[in-house]
Amino acid sequence: MKKYKARSRVVIENISPQVEGGKFPIKRIVGEVVCVTADLIADGHDIISARLIYRKQGTKKWFENQILITENDIWKGEFRVEETVPYEYAVTAWVDHAMTWHKGFQKKLAAGDELSLDLRIGAEFLKEIAVLKKGAENEAVWDLLSKLESGNYEMAVEAASSESMLQVLEKFPLKHFASTSTSYLVQVDRLKAAFSNWYEFFPRSSSPDINRPGTFNDCLPIITRLSQLGFDTVYFPPVHPIGVSHRKGKNNSTSVLSGEPGSPWAIGAFEGGHTAINPTIGTLEEFKNLINHAQSLNVEIAMDLAYQCSPDHPWVKEHPSWFKWRPDGTVQYAENPPKKYQDVLPIHFETDDWENLWKELKDVIEFWIEQGIRIFRVDNPHTKPFVFWEWIMAEMRRDHPDVLFLSEAFTRPKIMARLAKIGFHQSYSYFTWRKNKSELIEYLNQLTQTELREYFRANFWPNTPDILPEYLQNTGTNHAAMRFVLAATLSSNYGMYGPVYEYCVNKPVSGKEEYFDSEKYEVRHWDWRLESPMHNLIGKINEIRNQNPAFHSTFNILFCETDNEMLLSYFKSTDDGSNKILVIVNLDPINKQSGWVKLPIKEMKINDGELIGLTDLMDQSNYRWNETWNYVELDPQLTPCHIFKLTVNSSN
């Protein structure tokens, strides 16, 4: 019988949010509100009172906020996370005999009953509160108690039924036999986990001189340019020494010509491995100088974390048990049939020496953190054990809570979700292949209206060095512009691989979603000073994103009804309604499209007789709407979208 809390009568069920019963934390950013709901029920008709309790994990003091009933025994409360440390929260609830007494007292008073006995009961509650609460805040309790015991019936009744009595009972609840739920965790991250503008390029393709590959020093003016375009995160493919054995040539050829640089993802050579710099692009000091230069522009360098090795990596000789050897004495290279990666050896995580392997892989991260890196794009994390990543993420959250990890796992949904649950801060997404209106709406609703909202932060990329989607192949600027606008305005985290994207270099390998003459296998020379039609659009959209906090979340999206399947419209607003944005995108990159858009009147909190002022942030043109349905048209030869900033004004 001892396992039963015999006198705890409140049952707490269906606490939300939570992930797998609290096995994994929900995710929020600093300053964000955590809204918690729970079902609270008890036998009989006594009043239930409850509190949402929360604290920084590891501290003793719990803070509490009131949690109130909404409908159908569902209670709701909230708290705000203020630091990048783990928080925990729970719900505690009890049958509130004092409040039950007060409600009954009011009913009896209205019915004209004699209340002397009820006054004595109320006085007992006040005495108990007075014992528990000391000091100046207790004066109101003693004042009420003196009136209830004054012998003056009218005075006592007036005091017992007063607003002051209700306030005392609410402020100083008697939590007899309270039930308390399991506690749940919140992973609290810095803002960039939720809002970021990424740009990827190859440092070796940064040279202004066609006769040599680029260096870190050549990247300096490019970083400045990208900062001016509004990017806050620049991601480099691996910058480590590249193996020679089985090096790949142009277009993934197994026949390599003299001087061909190989794939940066074939990591490791005689110069070193994962903590070394490829000497052809610079030195460690030059890399650190580049990191500092970027930071001075409020740009962060994101580093590629690819746990794989070329056959020439020092680990192959120093730790042969970390690789899987075949009967012919060779190491099994990486494969994803029909693709073969003869220049890349996967790490054998089932090795008996797994503890030393894990420590070494963690040391790689620690090394680059010491050099100033705070963001890692993780290559193919789904090909490494989940338990390894769970350990890594826990270690990083404890020692480096400001370090962020982007999961590059274009794989099955549940695997992508598991990596996010484990702790990856952002995740590549299926946006790359979602094209028409229904697909986009379905996918965004899945990301924002299901449990994924609690732990999966999607990062929308229209292209990557590995992926040239069919939609973008051999097309023009309008196609690229429309997909860029969608990525940057649907999601608060987006990225692009350039400069091939803005220059519309999009010839594919025949029959594949891959770039012909891919930078993965050769040095390219770009004129980084060249202005394309895309540059103005990129700069404008990034400026709009940065200046309007409604774009700083993915989870606030509300799709609006239109009468044209080629028009996609969505509304975004900050929690306090101070920044309201309406986006309308033409999904047809060739033809002008027109139609009617229905405003979300309820969500916009618009009343009858009020006018909506709209400023199109794309060209600063102004409009006034006063109807639910409004006409729009978009010519892709002029602009791919309207981005309206809304104000609501009375028409009187």
Image: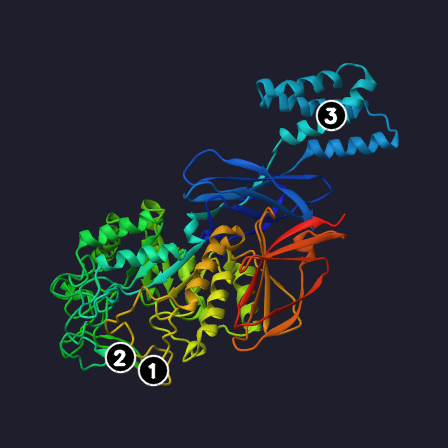
**Label 3 sits on what residue type?**
Ile
315 or 29: which is nearer to us?
29
Whether residues under marks 3 and 2 lie with C-beta atoms below 8 angstroms apart, the answer is no
Q: Around disc 2, counting alpha carbons within 10 Å, would you say few (fewer than 14), some (14 to 19), or many (20 or more)? A: some
**Label 1 sits on what residue type?**
Val
Q: Residue at x 46, y 63 (%)?
A: 537
Whether residues under marks 1 and 2 lie with C-beta atoms below 8 angstroms apart, the answer is yes
Q: Residue at x 59, y 18 (%)?
A: 136
Whether residue 367 is visible here, answered yes or no, is no
623 or 6: which is nearer to us?
623
Q: Judging from the image, what secondary structure is the residue with disc 2 in?
A: helix
Q: Judging from the image, what secondary structure is the residue with disc 1 in?
A: loop
**Tag shown at residue 509:** 1
**Tag shown at residue 121:** 3
Q: Around disc 3, counting alpha carbons within 10 Å, would you say few (fewer than 14), some (14 to 19), or many (20 or more)? A: some
Please state the total of marks drawn on the protein image. Answer: 3
Dot placed on the residue nearer the N-terminal end, 3 or 2: 3
Q: Which of label 3 and label 2 is nearer to you?
A: 2
Dot placed on the residue nearer the N-terminal end, 1 or 3: 3
Q: Around disc 1, counting alpha carbons within 10 Å, would you say few (fewer than 14), some (14 to 19), or many (20 or more)? A: some
**Tag shown at residue 251:** 2
Q: Residue at x 60, y 74 (%)?
A: 593
Q: Judging from the image, what secondary structure is the residue with disc 3 in?
A: helix
Left or right for 503, reference 628: left
**Label 2 sits on what residue type?**
Asn
Which quarter shows the N terminus? top right
